[in-house]
Image: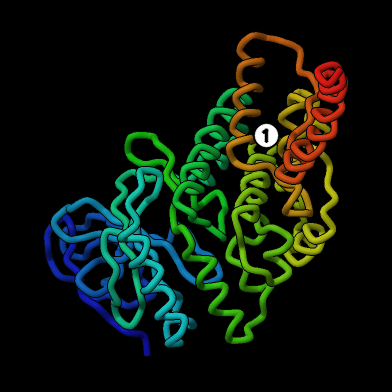
Amino acid sequence: MSETFKIPCPHCTRRLELRNEHAFLKIACPACGQSFKVNLPFGSYLLADEVGRDSFSSLHTLVREGGATPLLLRRLLPEFAGQPEMRNTFLKTSLQLAETKHPCLLQPVKVETIEGAPCAHYLMPGAESLKERMAKGAVPLAKALQLMMDITSLFENLDELGLVHGSLRPSQLRFDQHGNLRVFDLQLGASLLQSARAQGRAERLLIPNRGYAAPEVVRGEAAGRSSDTWSLGAIYYELVTGRRPHFSVRMEDELELCLGGVCDSPRQLNPKIPLLLSDLVMAMISLKPENRPEHSHSLELLQRVMDELDSGETYRREAVETPAAQMAAKKGCLPLLLLGATPLFWLLCR
């Protein structure tokens, strides 16, 4: 039998008895005839539309009676809420996020359990995700570059705190009410994935950022800083081409393509994309973590592309230095220095 609940009509305040299947639908009040959308009672709140979902949790708009500012609510899905380890991981990670103060992070303002489901509240009126922005249509190159620089700068700042996101995707980058990008759900998906794998659950079906997960994460390894670099590269690839680097209709096929590491470069899909930008994105989604550039170096190259775009210069191919290449370059300089110093030493000794 379907459960029932009572809510007041927002127009005439008459309390109506409704069933669960009425939730999130638009109905007409039998008393005043006015139509309104039904929000589902959830603890002391009203649960509005579902605006996002991953393997472990769902994201809703949360409404409070009296017209208070709406919240974003992340709640653990029912099939995981009954597992003590998953429930504790969700609460512990969310509480850690609430205590991490940094201007580029979107922190939970409250963490609690409602009707048996662990929940994290985020105060963000008028929030829009990068996914929603991209869904509106093609992003012009200049705007895409500015977004890339903003996002890369966010993660360069996170490097200073030693923080890793671990499950990055476009829905986890959200614009606040002032139009600034913020990082959302930092470490939450990665922590839940690690907990699920510890319980022996099907790994590939539980990757929260499928399509944006680095090959090592798909294989079951723990996410690191270079894994975030890969996810950023996949997002940038989509920003400038309109599709993911290893796109396939079937997600399992897309994961296999990701493990193979072969895809067309952005410039092959769109010849108008600057060569340096195309090379940078391909370096970011390299199969080997050690070949992916640091966020600071990526930011320098993005700035160079932006400067050349502003000046109208011809784009030139330049090598994208990776951490491994930078180390090799430092080692390679020593023999040259010794070779140059040998004639001077010989003259001084005469």
Amino acid at dot 1: Val
Q: Is residue 228 above or below residue 343?
A: below
Q: How is the image coloured?
A: rainbow
Query: Image point 57% across, 53% down: which residue?
Result: 169
In the figure, residue 221 lies in which quadrant? Answer: bottom right
Residue at the extreme bottom: 1
Question: Where's the C terminus, which quadrant?
Answer: top right
Q: Residue 251 appears at what percent x and percent y? A: 72, 63
Q: How many marks?
A: 1
Residue in front for this viewpoint, 17 or 267: 267
Residue 32 visible in the picture: yes
Q: Residue 48 appears at what percent x and percent y? A: 33, 61
Residue in front for this viewpoint, 29 or 9: 9
Please indicate whether residue 316 sits to the left or right of residue 18 in the image: right
Query: Image point 27% across, 59% down: which residue?
Result: 109
Q: Residue 225 appears at what percent x and percent y? A: 60, 54
Q: Is residue 98 above or below residue 155?
A: below
Please indicate whether residue 154 sits to the left or right of residue 116 in the image: right
Query: Image point 37% across, 66% down: which residue?
Result: 94
Q: Residue 87 appears at what percent x and percent y? A: 41, 80
Residue 26 visible in the picture: no
Label 1: few (<14), some (14–19) or many (≥20) C-alpha neighbours in 10 Å: many
Residue in front for this viewpoint, 344 or 307: 344
Residue at the extreme front: 350
Q: Secondary structure at mark 1?
A: helix
Residue that label 1 marks: 240
Question: Where's the N terminus, which quadrant?
Answer: bottom left
Query: Image point 70% across, 44% down: which residue?
Result: 323
Q: Is residue 1 above or below residue 288?
A: below
